[in-house]
Image (spheres, grey):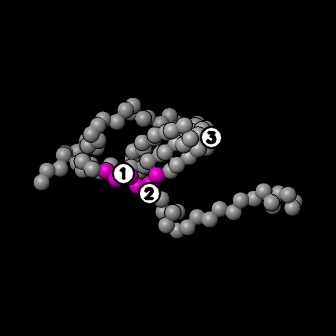
Amino acid sequence: MEEQQNNQLNIELTEDIAEGVYANLAIITHSHTEFVVDFIRVMPGVPKAKVKSRIVLTPEHAKRLMKAFQDNIAKYEAMNGKIDTHEEPPFPMNFGGPTAQA
């Protein structure tokens, strides 16, 4: 029992982080030592987008994250059906609406 308690990790989730941040685009870059994932929010008709969050991972952690996503997506699709990705998003992303004009 004592060994099990020593292996526990206490993770704190603050209120502001628990709210999350919406992103509808992710850009992934890498070097030989790290992967950088930028989460971006693109708004309809707005030519400028902001990076809302950046996560930096080691290659090993990036691969573990990929496997965790694959596992979770397989479980999701088993319960809810195949996720339709609509292939590549069109650029610029206009969300099917009119382009804003001043």
* Mark 2 or mark 3: whose residue is earlier in sequence: 2
Amino acid type, callout 2: Val
Q: Residue furthest front?
A: 32
- Tell me residue 70's x, y (percent): 58, 37
Q: Say which element carries label 1.
A: strand
Residue 21 disc label: 2
Question: Is residue 76 shown above or below 18?
Answer: above
Which residue has dot 3 on it? 60
Q: What range is drawn magenta here?
A: 49-54
Residues tagged 1 and 2 counted as in contact (Cβ below 8 A): yes
Determine if residue 76 is in view: no
Question: Is residue 15 shown above or below 38?
Answer: below
Which residue has dot 1 on it? 41
Residue 6 shown left or right of residue 35 in the figure: right
Amino acid type, callout 1: Arg
Task: Write the residue at 87% across / 60% down.
Answer: 1
Q: Say which element carries label 2.
A: loop
Amino acid type, callout 3: Glu
Q: Quadrant of residue 78?
A: top right
Q: Quadrant of the C terminus?
A: bottom left
Q: Measure how far apart labels 2 and 3 are at the Cα level.
A: 25 Å
Q: Quadrant of residue 68?
A: top right
* In magenta stretch: residue 52: yes
Q: Residue furthest right?
A: 1
Task: Write the residue at 19% across / 45% down.
Answer: 98
Q: Measure how far apart labels 1 and 2 are at the Cα level.
A: 9 Å
How many marks do you count on the picture?
Answer: 3
* Mark 1 or mark 3: whose residue is earlier in sequence: 1
